[in-house]
Amino acid sequence: MKIDNRIKAKDLEKPLDRFFELSVGKTKKLEKDWDAAKGSPVFTCRGKYTARGWTEWTQGFQYGIQILLFDATGDESLLAMGKRNTDRYMAPHVSHIGVHDHGFNNVSTYGNLRRLALEGKSGDGADLLKYYEMALKVSGAVQAARWSTIHDGTGFIHSFNGPHSLFSDTIRSCRALSLAHKLGHVLMGENDRRISLLERASEHIRNTVRYNVYFGKSRDIYDVPGRVVHEGIFNMNDGQYRCPSSQQGYSPFTTWTRGHSWVVTGAAEQLEFLKAHSLAGQADLKKDLLRTATATCDFFIENTARDGIPYWDTGAPGLAKMPDHLRKDSRPGNPHEPVDSSAAAITAQGLLRLGHYLGAGSAKGKRYWQAGLTVARTLFSDPYLSTDPKHHGLLLHSVYHRPNGWDYIPRGKKVPFGESSMWGDYHAVELAVYLRRIIRNEPYLTFFG
């Protein structure tokens, strides 16, 4: 991508105003149109949100959008909507033992409500604050209990595929553990063993870095610095690592860009958490996180289209028919491979957070900050901003599961485009709130408040 070193956060003020105006109307329309009995909205088909049975990992994003839009606009009806839906539908997610998605569902809802209460923006009192914090404590502990131990005695939070599966996505669910630890909670094990949630988060992150992130150390012939594999596979008879894998990417030896984006932003957020809290024994984790964040951000910059939007997988076979795809702006609707705006929305926040962490006086800090602003400018403008009021989505040209063929392809076309996803929309809103707070010199947005 080509980084614009002249753009400032202030330059995005009007595009953000437009984005919030469109988003409020669309969010209220979706709330009116959607039947919760169908499950969670996942992605759009012909502009209308639809469910897709796999796991209910997007419901927290749906209600988190409502809460975040209140944060940005002050629209009390959106706060009431988000609180009502969180109270009515999110409790099963707090105690859900079958998924690795607690950092998505519960921090996006209970976490945002807690933060707004602490900031005095929502008017919630001490009792509601305790309610939000109890949900977050339980969520962090339940997520930490989904644990696989490997050959060296450490472990990881395993994915819904089973105890052998280490997903890169889950690094961002570690914020559920970090937040619960901040609130003084622990996981209670057999014989009343008190298990540190921070230590579980640290071990998971270290093993994600160790097995799923590449640093040019010749692990295999595809060991490109900053590359990320979606999944690490372990033999659980002896805990030994076996091989890379991918559920949603093209192959284990290419980089699925949304899986990559979770690592970028998850690592940057955890750096901010560790910097904000005096936690003993975390120096090595900080080094691992900084090494990971910088390597993956560099990889994104080097392997993304000129305007900051990646294609869905850096090794997707159709890209061979587009040899200039990195030297030109992204092309949603091209006949070869889809772009994925949701990966860009997630990564933009990671770029900005890492740039902020390193500081504007640092050459790398400025580089990542400017890269994040460049991506954001593209996302909040045509052709990525969803302006049709009849379209449920907020951010266009998102992809869910290309290998399974789940994404809608318009008649006469060869690849999916023009649709939205609930995670893409949520992270676009979260990115917009982050930037608006920067522009207005408001409290810096973090998951830990």
Image: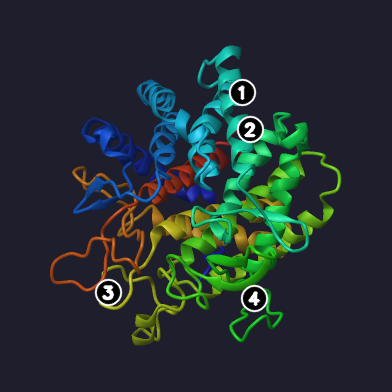
Q: CA distance from mark 3 to mark 1?
A: 46 Å
Q: Which residue is mark 3?
A: 334
Dot placed on the residue nearer the N-terminal end, 4 or 3: 4
Q: Nearer the viewer, residue 64 or 91?
A: 91
Above or below, 53 against 65 in this view is: below
Q: Quadrant of the C terminus?
A: top right
Above or below, 248 against 444 in this view is: below
At mark 3, the secondary structure is loop
Query: Which dot marks residue 225?
Result: 4
4 or 3: mark nearer the eye? 4
| Colour setting | rainbow
Q: Which residue is mark 2?
A: 449
Q: CA distance from mark 2 to mark 1?
A: 7 Å
- Marks 2 and 1 close (CB-CB < 8 Å): yes
Residue count near mark 4 (Cα–Cα under 10 Å), binned few <14, some 14–19, many ≥20:
some
Q: Quadrant of residue 137?
A: top right
Q: Nearer the viewer, residue 218 or 277?
A: 218
Q: Which residue is mark 1?
A: 118
